[in-house]
């Protein structure tokens, strides 16, 4: 829920049963449905209201970011192949957005550029931030992924427990697997 100048934005997410975005007048006497998609986030970015959705309603495929103006009018939107999960405002005119297909830089005009491509489905990315040196951190269930900028891309560093000195990312199992030499069994870093 988010207050606008002339009303409220109210979002619903019912998973596989669908969702919706509504605009309610300040006194609650009038309402109108704006979207029929699962709403995952309503945020103020660039001093304006934006709504993140999961269009498919199942899993994390398909989604969008909508800019919503007073009166509940959709001004602009950006479609994603995978639902946008979290954002970090890195400057006055751009945000970093993470989803299960990687990281995007989105401008205040809702133009996007994918800056890091990686299948994160099953790792559940749910937060993102960036340091002053442009290193990006993505929080996920059980793990943090650090992206260190280099000339044209990013070097991945998976932050796992200190007891797991050597590991590999098992993309099929969606897990980081410890490969500690001399251990009697492979341990999963959880």
Image (spheres, helix red, strand yellow):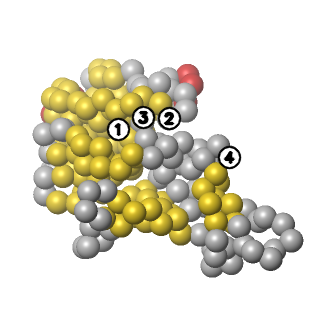
Seen in the image, is 187 located left or right of residue 147?
A: right
Single out the mark in the foreground, 1 or 3: 3
Q: Position of residue 138 (x, y in %)?
A: 43, 59
First reached walking from the N terminus: tag 1 or tag 2: 1
Disc 2: which residue: 60
First reached walking from the N terminus: tag 4 or tag 2: 2
Name the residue rendered at 30%, 71% in the picture.
131
Task: Say which element carries label 4.
Answer: loop
Disc 3: which residue: 82
Task: Say which element carries label 2.
Answer: loop
10 Å crowding of disc 3: few (<14), some (14-19), many (20+): many
Q: CA distance from mark 1 to mark 2?
A: 12 Å
Disc 1: which residue: 52
Single out the mark in the foreground, 4 or 3: 4
Seen in the image, is 19 located left or right of residue 165?
A: left
First reached walking from the N terminus: tag 1 or tag 4: 1
Name the residue rendered at 78%, 64% in the picture.
186
Q: Can I make out residue 55 in this image?
A: yes
First reached walking from the N terminus: tag 4 or tag 3: 3
Kindly indicate whether the residue at mark 3 contacts the one at mark 2 (C-beta within 8 angstroms): yes
Name the residue rendered at 68%, 60% in the picture.
177
Kindly indicate whether the residue at mark 3 contacts the one at mark 1 (C-beta within 8 angstroms): no
Q: CA distance from mark 4 to mark 2?
A: 17 Å
Q: Position of residue 66 (x, y in %)?
A: 26, 33
Disc 4: which residue: 173
């Amino acid at each position: 829920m988010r207050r606008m100048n002339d009303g409220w934005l109210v979002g619903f997410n019912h998973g596989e049963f669908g969702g919706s975005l509504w605009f309610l007048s300040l006194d609650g006497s009038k309402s109108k449905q704006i979207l029929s998609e699962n709403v995952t986030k309503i945020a103020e970015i660039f001093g304006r209201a934006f709504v993140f959705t999961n269009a498919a309603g199942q899993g994390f495929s398909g989604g969008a970011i909508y800019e919503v103006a007073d009166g509940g009018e959709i001004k602009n939107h950006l479609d994603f192949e995978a639902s946008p999960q979290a954002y970090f405002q890195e400057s006055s005119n751009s945000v970093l957005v993470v989803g299960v297909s990687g990281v995007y830089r989105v401008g205040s005009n809702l133009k996007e550029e994918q800056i890091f491509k990686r299948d994160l489905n099953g790792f559940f990315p749910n937060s993102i931030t960036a340091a002053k040196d442009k290193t990006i951190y993505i929080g996920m269930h059980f793990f943090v992924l650090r992206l260190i900028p280099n000339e044209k891309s990013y070097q991945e560093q998976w932050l796992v427990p200190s007891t797991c000195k050597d590991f590999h990312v098992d993309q099929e199992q969606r897990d980081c697997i410890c490969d500690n030499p001399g251990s009697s069994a492979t341990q999963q870093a959880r």
